[in-house]
Every structure is written in C-alpha cells, then in structure tokens.
Image (tube, coloured by chain):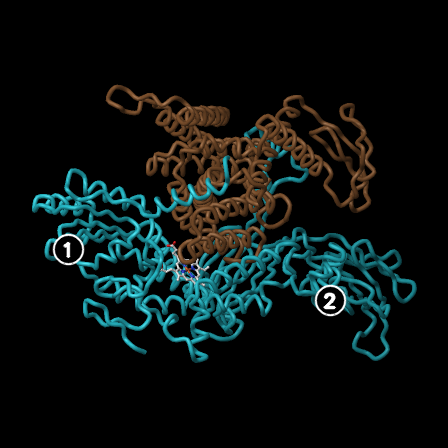
Amino acid sequence: MNKVTCECGHQNPYGTYLCESCGKPLQESDEKVANMRYEGVARRSQTYKSSIVDKIWNFFSSVKVGIWIIVLILVTSSLGTIFPQEMYIPPGTTATEYYQEEYGIAGQLYYDLGFHNLYSSWWYMMLIAALGISLVIASLDRFVPLYRALKKQRTTRHTAFMKKQRVFGESEGSLTEEDRTIMKERLKQKRYRVKEENGNLFAEKNRFSRWGPYVNHIGLIIFLIGGMLRFFPGMYLDEYVWIREGEREVISGTNGEYFVENREFMVELYDDQEEDLFQEALTREDNPVVSNFQTSATLYKRPEGIIGDNAELEKVKDHDIRVNQPLTFEGISLYQVDYRLNELSTFTFTVESDTVDLEEDMTFQVDLNDPARYYEFENGYQIELLEYFPNFYIDNNGEPSTQNRVPDNPRIIFELFTPDQDPEAEGTEGELSLIGVRVNEELNGERDHVIRMEDVELVDATGLTVRRDHTLPFLIAGGAIFMVGLIQGSYWHHRRIWIQEKAGRLYVAGHANKNWHALKRDLSFVSENTRLPEAADQLDDEAENEEEVQQKKGGNA
Amino acid sequence: MFEFSSAMLYAAFVLYLLATILFAVSITGKRFKDKSGEEKNRAGILGYAASIAALLSGLTYFVTRWIAVGFAPVSNMFEYMTALGIAMSLAFAIIYPMYKNNYLGLFTMPVVMLIIAYASMFPGEAQPLIPALQSNWLFIHVITTVIGQGILSIGFAAGVLYLVRKIDFTKKSRKVKGIEFIMFSILSLVAYVGIGIGFGAADYTAQFNYVDENAEEAVMDYYLPPLVGPNEGELVSEQGFTPVINTPAFVRSNDLNTVLWSFIGGLVLYGGIRGIGRKPVAASLQPVVKNVNPQTVDEISYRAIAIGFPVFTLGGLIFAMIWAQIAWTRFWGWDPKEVWALITFLFYAAYLHLRLSRGWHGEKSAWLCVIGFALIMFNLVFVNLIIAGLHSYA
Ligand code: HEM
C-alpha cells in the first residue's frame, strides 16, 4: 500500500484522514467538522479489505456489528423470561408436560423452540462468543493506531486542522507575552499540561481516560473467559447433601477429607403476637413469616496420613449456616438451601402377647435410616427384619416397593421366632407382621404375639448445597478491571486546546472526546480579558441553521 | 420515629411540588432585569433550594425509617419506589449545578413526585426481612442500584425535554404519536394514583365470591368499583355493584380492573388537556420550552447516562452478583430480574456505542433515553409484580 505524503513532509499510512503529524486533512470532505475519532489515523480494518482474514477482521471490528450483537443478545435474553426456565419449574413436574399444561399452545411452542433452556442453547452461546470475538478484534484494531497518534502530537497543527475542530475561534491580531503567561497560568490552574512551540500553545489533560474503553473491554473479555472455564472439568463443583440432626456426612470434592455434622437444625418464625412495628404486616400475611433457617454445623477433618474409617476426626470449627452465611473453608462453601422437618428416625416397639407369658419386657428400637437385621432378647426370643421399605408404595407390578431411601412412609416386615424355634434351621417359620405408621397386619395367619409400636422419634434434616467455583477469581478480576475502565472512561474526559498565531491571525481550537460543555467553560476561562478570540461551537450554528431550514419547511407555523 | 419518618416523606413531597412551581415560575415568569442588567428572576435558584430541601427531607425519611425498622428501607415495592424518587432528586441535585438549567428542574421534579406518589400505592407499613434479605449486601446492592437508576432517569427527563422542544407538531408523524404516547402514559399513572387515593380515602371495598383457576371457591377484594368481575363472581359486600362482564379464571380481575380505571382516567385527562389546548398535549408544552438550547439538553441527557451507567453496573450487576453468590450459592442464575438488569445494562451499552461511533445524537439519542427508562420501570414494576421469580417484592 502506498504511503500518503502530507505537505509537511510526513509520510502517513494509507487510509489516514488527518496527517498524523500536523493534522491537515488528507481526504476531501464536506463536513464542517473533522472526524476526530481515533485522531483520523488509519486502522487495519479500513486499510486491508481483500483476504478472508481481512473480511472476518473487518466484520468483527465494526462497531455497527458489535451493536447488532449486543442488541441480539438483549432481545433473545428477554425471550427467556416470558415463561420460567426449566430449572425454575416446580420440582416433580416434567418439562414436556409442564409448559403445555400451564401455558397452552404458547407454552408448547416455547418448549419446542427450546426456549425453556434458552441460556444454554448453542445459538445463545454463539452470540456470547461473537460478542467476545468482536470485543477483542475491535479493541485491537483501534488500540495501536490510537496509541501512536496520541503519543506523538505536535504542538503546531495545520490551520486546516484547527478550522475543522468543533470548538473553534479566529481573529486578526497577535498575542503579547503577557497574554501567553496568563493563559498558561490559567491552563495549569485547570490542570492542563501545556507545551509551547514558536509561540503556539498546546494544552492537554486527562489523556488516560481515552484508554478507559480498552480497559473495560479487557475486563469484559476476562469475565467472559472466566464464564467459559465453567465448562472445564474440575473447575466447578455443585453438589447437594441431606444431613439429619446428629449425623455427619462426608463433603464431596474433598477426597473424603472433610466431614460436616448437623448438630441442630431450626426454623424460626416472626412472632405476630408481639406488638411491634411489624405486627400489622405480619397479621396481614396468611402464613407465618420465617425469620431464620439455620443449621448448627461442625466441620471435621480427617487427620493427615491416616486412612481408614476408624481414625478419629479432628474438629475444625463450628459454624451456624444460615441463608447469607455459608460455611466456607478452602474454597468450598456450604449453603443453607433446604430442610425437612420432623422426619421419622426411630421406631420403638414392644412385643406383647395375650396367650404367652413373656417373662420380661421385650422392647427394641429400629433406626429407620440404618436398621439392624436381628433383634435378640434375654428370654430367647428373636426377631428378624425381613424387609424394609423406607418410603412404601405399590409399584406397577403390584409389588410392594420403596420410592427412595427417605423414611417418609416406612413399612417393615418382621419375623418373630419364639425361644423354641431355631431361625437357622430349614423350614422354620416365624410369625410375620407388616408394620408401619398406623399399620399392623399379620401376614401368615393367627399370631400369638403382637409387635406394637410404642414410640416414634423425629429429627429435622437440613439440605445443604456444596459449592466450589474456581472460576471466581477470573470473574472477580474481570469485573474489577471492567469497573476501573468504565470509571476511567466515564468520569474523566480527554480535552485538548490548541492556540496558534499565523500570518497576523489568531486561532484557537478545542477538542473533547465528551463533555464539551466543560471544555467550552475552560476555554472562556482561559481567554477572558486576553486577546484570544472567543471560541464557538460550530455544531451550534449548524443546529440553528437546521432549525431555520426546518421552520421554513414547516411553513407558517 | 416511624411516624416522624413518614411525616418527613410527606414534607419532601410538598417541597418537590414547591420546587416544580418555582422552576415553572423561573421559566414563564417575567424576566426582570435590574439597572445593571443583572437577572432578577431568582425563582430558578429558589427552585433548586426547594429541591435540595426536599432531598434532605427525603433523606431524613430514609435514615429515620432505617433506624426505626433496623434495616435499609429498600425491601419492598413501597420502599424501593420511594428510594428511586429520592435517588432521582439526588441525581438532579448533582447535575443541576453543572448546567444551571431550570428546564431540567421543570421536567425532573414532576417525575420525582409521580414516582413517590406511585410508591404510596403499595402497602407502606414496616415488613420484617425474610432470611434471604438479611444481609448488609441488601443496602449495598440496592442503594447503589437505585442511585444508578435515579441518575439514568435524569437522562429520561432531559430526553423528553429535548423531544418536546424539537418535535414538529404541525405535521402528523410517528414522532408526534410517540411523544403523545409518553404523555398519555404519564397521565394514566397520574389517574391511577389519583383514583387510588380517592377510593382509598373513602375506604372503598367490594368483595366477590368467585371460582379461581383451580376451579375452587375463593374470595376477591376490589378497592375500586368493579368494571369487570372475577370468574363467576358474585358480589357479597354492601359496597360495589355487579359488573358488566366477568373475566375468565386465569385473569387476575381486580388487577385488570385497576388497569382499566387507570386507562380510562388517563383517557379523560389526556382528552381534556388535548381538548382545551386544541393540539397535542406535548405541543401545548412546547412554547414553554422554546428557549431551551437543544444541544445543551442533549448533552445533559448524555452526561446523565454516562454518569449513571457505571453506578448502575456496579450496583445492579456487580454487587448483585456478589450477593447472589453469598445468598443463593451462585452469582448468576438467569432469574427474570437478573436477566432484565442485564438487558438494561446491554441497552445502555448499545446507547453509548451508537452515540460514540454512529453519531446518534439529538433526537435518536433522546428516544433511546426514553426507552431506557421504560426498561428500568418495566423491570421494577412488571417483572416484580407479574413475572414471578426469586426477587418477588410486595
Ligand atoms: C456488553 C458489551 C460492551 C460493553 C459494556 C462496552 C462498553 C463500552 C464503553 C463503556 C465504552 C466507552 C463509551 C463512552 O465512553 O461513551 C465503549 C467504547 C467502545 N466500544 Fe464497547 N462495550 C461492549 C461491547 C463492544 C463490542 C462488541 C464492540 C465491538 C465492535 C465494542 C467497541 C467499542 C469501541 C470501538 C469503543 C470506542 C473506543 C474509543 O473511543 O476509543 N464494544 N465500550
């Protein structure tokens, strides 16, 4: 590509708008105000246009495309909120039926289009990826040229450059040394850095704010990468554990090293009897309002180097796990997410008989979460637990079965052997009973003995989420960098002022990347009571003109 | 303390009204010049003083309520909406000195009042915090977000100002329809508040027995006269009358009834103003703002967005994610409220890029400011009340 030589002698890359050195416009344009974006320098995307790589590069570096990507993400994201996402439909319902039953044809369509899992759909991912690519390419495309242009700025600019600035003023005359000193003084007071060359002044401040967008885009990219890491194995742990009061469970993801014990679980309610500020609101609610969910937990660790179940666990710490107060250790957090109150835990039975003298009190306990198989008594009786259904139901084949291991509806089949029976011997048949809550049936004819439920013990169980997320450091870094860049670019603005004397005329021009208002204020502060001409906003005139035109067009309104 | 707090909110409301009046006087009042040619119309500066007094009064409400209930009062619709109104006036207090533009005051103060009046339609008594909200992140996240939204709302006020100033009302156009739609929406909200306060003061309640969507018998209360009734509704209270039509079971008919009332009220107000002025409502406002410099207003709206965007991002996304990680085990869960915060963020990002790179200044930019505000309100009102999620307030 040919270089373009400016009249000042500087060789500019092909595609340059404004000479990198003196600022003279190199391409004809009718615009009153020069396009100062990226200082009029050539960008790769505007220079190379032929190969495939160039085409892809140019596509993604275009802000127009970038905006389209943002808008597409915005619009599609909103579609996902029309009906709940699959993860939020009530537990126990299946998506296939739920959407149709709940929302009719629209729901069916929603489901068929895959919108019930919109945010993990391949095309949504593609959009996010396109955003990332666009961010990288657009930033690279602009960063280097902008850096070069801002690095080497000349104090004396071409008058054509001055005239094409949005804020501009000119007049006959020349500046005295006193004027210059006053102006420099005032500029410094406004925290400008001032350079002087042959009596011409160049003042600049807050250049660093120009890097704000690049910093924030880098932050975003890091954030997106962090989000992507989620899909690599080992980066992310999301488990669930139920623990009954008094029990201890191993924490997954710790190689069996850590255990957590649920010492006590509780739900506390706000008291609507108490006469306080909240009473009015509480009595209006139909249901009691919960004030606290809490698991009093203890964290244990298996001592180093000892394997095997018998090793004594070391207590690490006690912690009350509440919503908003997870138990955190070594990057793993345990969160309070669910609970079950009054879960059955132990049945106590006694054996009674009307016909036989049992000689002693026959009482035994069955742990519903880990029942023993045999129960032997001093008087020689034996009871065997033949079958246990923690959550009893009759399955499709009409067979008794259990839904899960949670003792919500336990049924037990006991076989009772009298002292004169030998359970080991072939063909020995004891008395069979099927027992559950308010159930007690004989299974093989008349019984001499009744196994009667005497007592039940209940416990509360807590549901904890176990979470470890190695992507968090990336997300935190990305988010922090993004915020820094955002603030850098939003709360400071790059401002420049050029003051020049040429052939008996005075020129002043100003440029701000935003907040022109402040720039104009600075300029009138600097030029007050000096010979420097008043600078005007050339777009203001334009706006006025446009209005006049409009008024003429609008007729005699 | 609690009563005192509520009284301060009333005081703030009255002061906002005063500020509105003073700003109106500063614009329409005579331009007195004294002998040396100095501007003698002090109404603008008095208006700003009144808005500051209102802000202080509003902040006193906020702080004393905080002390009284023991947590930041941003935990339900009433508290959040009120906070938004106060935040918007805080943003105004910051931005006014930069531009000293009385027109901005004239357009901002009524919006603040309307937001606070709307807030008062929700139950205002103190409610205890559910476990998920018991965290310092409640005030860190919500207060930052609400301030961000308040600043962004200034962009809306300036955008509407710009549109009223610039739109050519002599011809019928989509723009005229658009701005008139904004006026109608605002008037409907005024009607909603007015009707609500009116019937509320009269303690109006009508009660119906009806059959709900699960085909079970239930009871529904109306606080406005029933234009539409519930499914198979049967009036059981003394007040009220039998409505013309009953709605199907899946409609929440008392809410629909309220919407209908607001719509009709809005039509009456809108039609009335339009009839008296014999031109579009916004066109009647235009002469008032004819001396506004459009460039300045355009810049104000942009500045407001540029200042508000980082604050909103910090509060509405970053602090939100930190809290979600602590309270809900994950920093992001595609809950509707979260998604709509993301949409708002993306929308303003698109706005900034359009403005910076595609030269969307002036009118286009002003429309975008209006849409952005609509998104914020949508997320606050519609997503909270209609789309159920983890964030259900009220
Ligand atoms: C959600 C995603 C994005 C966010 C939050 C974001 C944020 C920003 C912000 C805050 C600015 C500064 C604007 C201003 O100062 O008024 C900016 C500038 C910019 N953004 Fe983005 N951006 C995003 C995506 C993109 C994409 C996809 C592109 C790709 C084309 C892009 C290209 C640019 C460019 C070229 C600038 C101007 C840089 C300059 O002035 O030197 N942005 N961005």
Q: Residue at x 44, y 33 (%)?
A: B289
Whether residue A112 is visible, yes or no, is yes
Tell which quarter ligand 1 is in: bottom left
Residue B270: give x, y in percent of width and height. 61, 31
State how far apart marks 2 and 1 are (Cα): 101 Å
A297 to B47, vertically: above or below: below
Q: Nearer the viewer, residue A536 or A182?
A: A536
Crowding near the residue tagged with mark 2, few <14, some 14–19, many ≥20 C-alpha atoms within 10 Å:
few
Question: Disc 1 on helix, strand or loop?
Answer: strand
Query: Chain for mark 1?
Result: A
Q: Residue at x 25, y 66 (%)?
A: A20
| Amino acid type indicated by mark 1 | Lys
Q: Nearer the viewer, residue A58 or B21?
A: A58
Q: Judging from the image, what is the letter of the chain drawn in brown?
A: B
Q: Nearer the viewer, residue B136 or B374?
A: B374
| Amino acid type indicated by mark 2 | Glu
Whether residue B123 is visible, yes or no, is no
Give the colour chain A carries in the figure.
cyan
Q: Residue furthest left?
A: A177
Query: Chain for mark 2?
Result: A
Crowding near the residue tagged with mark 1, few <14, some 14–19, many ≥20 C-alpha atoms within 10 Å:
some
Circle 2 sits on which residue?
A376
Query: Which labelled disc corresponds to residue A98?
Result: none
Circle 1 sits on which residue?
A195
Question: Disc 2 on helix, strand or loop?
Answer: strand
